[in-house]
Image (cartoon, rainbow, N blue to C red):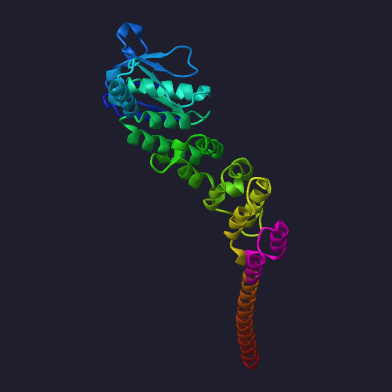
Amino acid sequence: MVCEKTEDKNTMETKETTFCVESPFKNNTELFDNKDMFPDMVFVVAGLESPLLLHKGIMAKTSKLVDGLLKAKQTAKTGDSNQIEWPFDTTNERDRAALVKALRFCYDETMTVDAKGGELCAVIAALCRLQVACLKEMIVKLTEFAVEQAKKDATVGKELLKETQLYPECCNPNTVELDKALAKVVFTRENICENFETVVSDCLMKLPKHFLDVAEYGDPHTPFSEFNIRTQYLKEHDDTLTKEEKEMVMKKCDWTKLMSKELMTLRELDILGKDAMIEACNKALENIEEKIREYKERFEHEKVKSESILITYVNDHTLLTFL
């Protein structure tokens, strides 16, 4: 996707799954990694073929992290004061590419971010780690973009949500809780019922257990019910969850809605203590008794109504006969 620059330095444009952002920083695009433009800082990134040739003034102004590292070297009077080593893991090519993209953004190069392929979360992480001057605005816009893409396509939402787990910066209340924002639109009742394999089998089952509390489940006694999905989660994570964790997962179900078959399943899981199992049975029984009372009241009401109609009919028929 190509974005033409406009007078508004904060222009942001979206097309399909690609998000385009114009940098708010001063025009220094030609200076980036250009040995002929008097660079005074060597930026070393593990995995890149060669260090990046950057400028202290530009990076100190646009990145709080780089500014801090430069000041620390200046104070310590180290012999490598003109060299900065990126302190984060860049074993993955995607992370290296995202970092370079974020650095170019600091030099006023327009940034394009794709919701697919894991790039979006990697870019958010790079911007957070650099602590770019416009971080808050960028995070808001990228989060909104990610959520909109997730709403449009459950598959895209699934992949984005799974990728957030690779970057602590995407799951941090001090930066952005992109994982929570995505979970709200991915684990909707509609998605769970209509895209079960995508959002449950290939997503919810792969995530930490706290995401079970975000999901909007289908009707009771169906494959999409909260009980059945939580049970499936326990079976798939049988080796990684402790008995106490399994018990907490199942205790969050609405036991009043369980039927005999589901109670048998709960018993077979053998994760609830005796008291908790008795409580589950009692709540289910109380619910059944309440349903029976409701049905009886409804029956009596319909019975009275039917008798009234019959009496009216007989009286009308008798009157007509008499006439």
Stretch in magenta: 257-282
- The front one of 11 and 54 is 54
149 displayed left or right of 292? left
| Residue at the spot 47% in from the left edge and 21% down from the top edge | 97
- The front one of 78 and 17 is 78
Please provide percent x and percent y for residue 185: 49, 45
Q: Is 19 within the magenta?
A: no
- Vertical placement of residue 150 versus 79, above or below: below
| Quarter of the figure that contains the N terminus | top left
274 displayed left or right of 34? right
Please provide percent x and percent y for residue 171: 46, 40
| Residue at the spot 62% in from the left edge and 40% down from the top edge | 202
| Residue 318 seen | yes
Please provide percent x and percent y for residue 250: 61, 57
The residue furthest bottom is 322
- Vertical placement of residue 187 versus 303, above or below: above
Please provide percent x and percent y for residue 169: 44, 36
Tell me the quarter of the picture where residue 174 sits. top left
165 displayed left or right of 283? left
231 displayed left or right of 217? right
